[in-house]
Each structure stands twice: as structure tokens, then as C-alpha cells.
């Protein structure tokens, strides 16, 4: 599958899954806002270290930060099942905060500050300006809580108009070319919306954080979009394909 198309397909999946999470919260009387790219109540709430851990699902990323298979296996066992965490009847925000705290402690134990920064850079390469909603990246680029909220609101507003269109296109006999074009349009609109609320200094810091270009594997599932263990325990499995330094990004 074409890597650009696969990346955009992953992005569209985030919209659909984020909407489902919000709908689930609303049904429990806990909705906190409209769904979208990282809007309050959406997948952006996962954030922080859990998103970085999600990137480690890809073998190529683990090699990039010098993480051994043994270390990855050990931390996989220590992390929560994200599907259960997001679907719990309790306080999801509190559960995610606790899980992020544990994930950060784990990263501090197994990765140097330089390698953690590299993970943040890979997340920016992977998610584009949308990565600014990640707590760790927001801090790195000087984006305060109010700024993060503005970014989340911009992402939500930009994606709202596209969700229904995406639902109509995602059918068994959907036109792949139309899907690709719609996803490219959605990605562009969301990135432009986020860029509009970032200061020039913040945009430069975000760009600098990317570091050396990294080519993500084609058959990577939704790793890095869903956070660790979205379908199981820990950062999960399912990383495939081959990645290498110096290639193009999927943003």
C-alpha cells in the first residue's frame, strides 16, 4: 500500500475513533466537548508519554532510540490495556493521568533524555503540527495550557466539517482515490488551523524538534496514533515493514 495513502488512512481512523470515544463519554454523562483531532474528550487526551510509548510499537523506532527487544518486552508487560482504560466506567481522565505518569517513569528508566527528545521529534514527524497537543511537546515548544486548548479547539473545528464526508466515503465499495483526496484535504485543513494559533517561535521550535528525517514503515497499523496497546497490553505489537533514517516523512 502506498505509504502516503496509508498514513492518511491512519489519520482518518483517528477521527472516527476519537468520535466514538466522545460519544461513549457523552452516553455516561461525561462528555467534555466536541470530537475531533485531539479535542477535549478525544484521543488528544491520551497525550504525554503514552503517545511516545505508542511509537515504540514499531521496531524501526526502537532501533532509532537504541532500545533492545528485551527492554521493549519488559515495558510492554508493565503498561495498561488502552482499550480497557478508555472504556472503563471510572474516571477516564484520572486513569489516563496515572497511566501517563507510569509511562513517563518507565521512559525515564529505559531511555536517555536525548532519546526521549528523539521520540518527541518522531511524533512531530508522524503527526505534524497536531503533535503540539501532546503535553511533553507543548512544554518543549513553549505552549502553555491555554495555548494547548486553543490548538485543540482549532483541530476540532477544522475536522468537524470533514467527519460526515469521511463516513460517507468509508464504505466497502468506497472510491480509494476520493478517500485519498478527502484525507489529504482534511490533513491540510487541520494543520493550517493549528499553525494559525501557534506563534512563529512555537512553529520554529516544533520544526526544529523534528530532527533528522525518518521513514516510517508502511505496514505499521495505527501505531503512534492510538497510543500504546490500543488493542492489547503495553505498547503492543503489530509494527511491520522497514524504516530507515534519511527517508521522507508521511506528513
Image: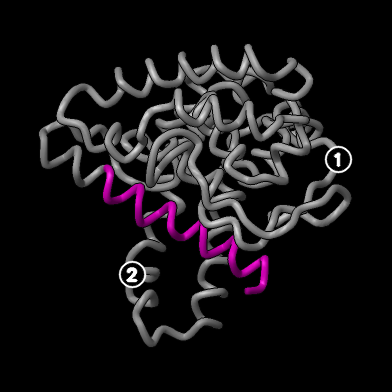
Rendering coords of residue 234 (x, y %) = 45, 33
Whether residue 228 appears in magenta in the rendering, the answer is no
For the residue carrying disc 2, how many other residues have a C-alpha within 10 Å: few (<14), some (14-19), or many (20+)? Answer: few
User: Going by the picture, which residue comes out furthest to the front?
Assistant: 70
The quarter of the picture where residue 204 lies is top right
Residue 30 lies in what quarter of the image? top left
Q: Residues within 10 Å of mark 1 (few under 14, many from 20)?
A: some
Tell me: 33 left or right of 188. Answer: left
Q: Nearer the viewer, residue 113 or 170?
A: 113
- Residue 250, percent from left and from top: 69, 57
Residue at the spot of label 2:
167
Q: Which residues are magenta?
A: 1-21
**Residue highlighted by disc 1:** 212
Query: Could you tell me if the residues under marks 1 and 2 are in contact, i.e. CB atoms within 8 Å?
Result: no
Quick one: SS at disc 2?
helix
Which quadrant: the N terminus?
Answer: bottom right
Q: Position of residue 43 (x, y in %)?
A: 40, 40
| Magenta residues, dominant SS class | helix
* Rendered position, 174 above or below 26: below
Amino acid at each position: 500500500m502506498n505509504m502516503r495513502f496509508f498514513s492518511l488512512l491512519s489519520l482518518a481512523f483517528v477521527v472516527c475513533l476519537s468520535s466514538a470515544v466522545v460519544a461513549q463519554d457523552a452516553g455516561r454523562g461525561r462528555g467534555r466537548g466536541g470530537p475531533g483531532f485531539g479535542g477535549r474528550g478525544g484521543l488528544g487526551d491520551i497525550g504525554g508519554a503514552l503517545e511516545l510509548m505508542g511509537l515504540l510499537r514499531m521496531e524501526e523506532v526502537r532501533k532509532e532510540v537504541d532500545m533492545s527487544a528485551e527492554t521493549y518486552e519488559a515495558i510492554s508487560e508493565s503498561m495498561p490495556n488502552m482499550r480497557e482504560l478508555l472504556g472503563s466506567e471510572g474516571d477516564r481522565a484520572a486513569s489516563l493521568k496515572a497511566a501517563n505518569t507510569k509511562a513517563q517513569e518507565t521512559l525515564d528508566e529505559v531511555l536517555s533524555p536525548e532519546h526521549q527528545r528523539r521520540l518527541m521529534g518522531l511524533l512531530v514527524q508522524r503527526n505534524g503540527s497536531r503533535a503540539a497537543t501532546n503535553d511533553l511537546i507543548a512544554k518543549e515548544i513553549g505552549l502553555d495550557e491555554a495555548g494547548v486548548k486553543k490548538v485543540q479547539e482549532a483541530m476540532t473545528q477544522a475536522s468537524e466539517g470533514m467527519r460526515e464526508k469521511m463516513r460517507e466515503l468509508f464504505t466497502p465499495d468506497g472510491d480509494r482515490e476520493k478517500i485519498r483526496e478527502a484525507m489529504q484535504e482534511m490533513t491540510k485543513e487541520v494543520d493550517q488551523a493549528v499553525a494559525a494559533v501557534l506563534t512563529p517561535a512555537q512553529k520554529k521550535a516544533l520544526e526544529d524538534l523534528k530532527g533528522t528525517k525518518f521513514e516510517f514503515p508502511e505496514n505499521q497499523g495505527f501505531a503512534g496514533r492510538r497510543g500504546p496497546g490500543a488493542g492489547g497490553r503495553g505498547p503492543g505489537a503489530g509494527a511491520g515493514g522497514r524504516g530507515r533514517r534519511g527517508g521522507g516523512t508521511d506528513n
